[in-house]
Image (cartoon, helix red, strand yellow):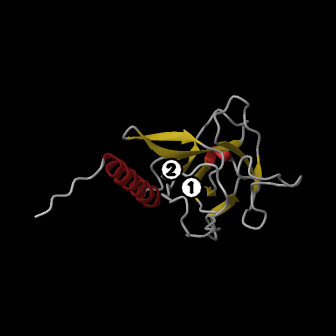
Amino acid sequence: MLKYHSSPAMVVALLALFIAMGGVGYAASDSTSSPQQSTVAARQGSGKSGKHAAKAVPGLTRAYALVTPPCGGCAKLPRDFSPISRTQSMNVTLGSVSPSAPVGTWCFVLGGGINPTAATIVTSVVNDGGPRRYHFLLETAQWVAGGSACSQNQIEVQTLGYIVEGGSLIAVPNHEIAFSFSVDSK
């Protein structure tokens, strides 16, 4: 009978997958526990899952956005470029990020009279199929409740990619990760 031994990289990859799946289930099932909930989506760098943006749910969702950042250094951007999709966003504009904020920090201004301190934001990584300088084992987008990298009355989202280094899963802040988010506010 053959014995099978998992490599350290396979163990770390499976652990990352189970953590990501647990985060999705937690955020989807427990909407009252903490305003810092986020969904996490594992994605292979060359996956063909297509675009999936947050959609408005009548009576619940007050704002949503699809954010598709450019590949750093891949091409020259048009003057009017915005990472926020004009057709798949509502009541959201780009805010100002503190110069001391880590890479991968995003700030957004909510329109429609939404109070950011009374809002719940759910984030999700999106496979935009665009070019990237980095290909991560796992990518996340997290809402940071009360974050200090954005101006007052803005919401903060941080994007991270994960790599395996020396048998450990390492988080790397990255500004090229596409994501969507929706805002529920009472």
| Callout 1 secondary element | strand
**Side (left or right) of 82 relative to 20:** right
Q: For this rendering, which residue is in front, 58 or 147? A: 147
Which amino acid does the dot numbered 1 rest on? Val
**Residue at the location (50% across, 58% down)?**
41
Which residue is at the far right?
Answer: 79
- Percent of width and height locating residue 47: 54, 65
Vertically, is 32 above or below 151? below
Q: For this rendering, which residue is in front, 115 or 151? A: 151
Q: Residue 2 carries which label?
A: none
Q: For this rendering, which residue is in front, 159 or 58? A: 159
| Callout 2 secondary element | loop
**Residue at the location (62% across, 50% down)?**
119
Q: Mark 2 points at which residue?
A: 37
Which residue is at the far front?
Answer: 2
Vertically, is 156 above or below 49? above
- Percent of width and height locating residue 93: 77, 52
First in residue order: circle 1 vs circle 2: 2
**Residue at the location (64% across, 32% down)?**
148
Which amino acid does the dot numbered 2 rest on? Gln
Few, some or many C-alpha atoms within 10 Å of disc 1 (few <14, some 14-19, many ≥20)? many
Few, some or many C-alpha atoms within 10 Å of disc 2 (few <14, some 14-19, many ≥20)? many
Q: Which mark is residue 122?
A: 1
Q: For this rendering, which residue is in front, 71 or 182? A: 71
**Residue at the location (62% across, 52% down)?**
177
Vertically, is 140 above or below 65? above
Which residue is at the far left?
Answer: 1
Question: Is the N terminus in the top left, top right, bottom left or bottom right quadrant?
Answer: bottom left
